Image (cartoon, rainbow, N blue to C red):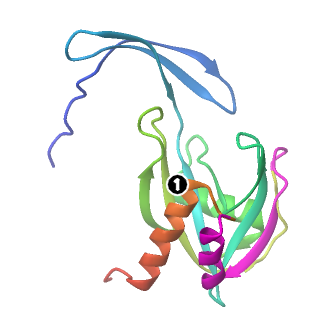
Amino acid sequence: MDDPPRSPWRIVSSTYPIVSPFLKLRSDVIELPGGHIIRDYYVRETRGFAIIFALTRNHDVVLVRQYKHGAGRYLVELPAGAIDEGESAGDCAARELTEETGYSGEPPELVRSFLADPTNSNGVFHLFLVRDAVSRAAQALDVTEDITVETVSLDKLRTKIHDGTISTGSHVACIYTMLDYLANPPAR
């Protein structure tokens, strides 16, 4: 495999003006190929997150409704969460599905990974399929979470995208990717 190309931007120095449980922000001083210096180029650092498309035995999809402070409103999304330090993306997917919804199923199957915001973040999100999801436990929510769980058919899921009920870009991309994946499964 070829080595990835080197960055044409040279990081002269970096500092971390914000490091908290909710945000790690790096401030870079960058030298561009032509010699121009850019100060205070901010990059959000993250271990990434998992988004889970949990499909029940009846082929319904598990959704969550919860308040998102950045948007300042309640949103309907697929279950999802941040990868903890030392945790694999697949383990995160299984943990977050159970914690947020009480559902679990077959081991999470990685379908695809996406860049979250490559201009200002190193974040990657991973889309997992969990088949035969069944409600087996009570939710185990974080202090910042107040989650309502619902299941919808694949047709109603499409409607929720089309009418704007599901409007988070990463979740819309994951749903369309998963609908294509389910309609055209890869050869095994």
- 20 drawn magenta: no
131 to 166, vertically: above or below: below
Quadrant of the rendered image containing residue 5: top left
Q: Nearer the viewer, residue 107 or 43?
A: 43
Q: Amino acid at mark 1?
A: Ala
How far across and how far down the image is residue 27, in percent? 49, 17
Q: Give the residue pinned by disc 1.
A: 89
Q: Is residue 54 left or right of residue 100?
A: left
Q: Quadrant of residue 102?
A: bottom right
Please name the residue shown 19% across and 13% down the image.
34
Where is residue 36 drawn, in percent x and y? 28, 9
SS label for mark 1:
helix
Give coordinates of residue 154: x percent, y percent. Answer: 60, 82
172 left or right, relative to 99: left
Name the residue rendered at 62%, 63% in the picture: 94
Judge left or right: residue 172 versus residue 12: right
> In the picture shown, does residue 118 fall above or below 43?
below
Q: Is residue 140 visible?
A: yes
9 relative to 139, above or below = above
Percent of width and height locating residue 181: 42, 77
* Residue at image point 46% right, 81% down: 182
Number of numbered discs: 1
- Other-residue count near label 1 (Cα within 10 Å), few / some / many at <14 / 14–19 / ≥20: many
Q: Which residues are magenta?
A: 142-164
Identify the image quadrant of the C terminus. Answer: bottom left
Task: Note whether residue 91 is visible.
Answer: no
Furthest residue in direction bottom, as rendered: 58
User: What residue is rendered at 53% in x and 45% in y?
Assistant: 48
* Placement of 8 over or under 123, stated as above or below: above
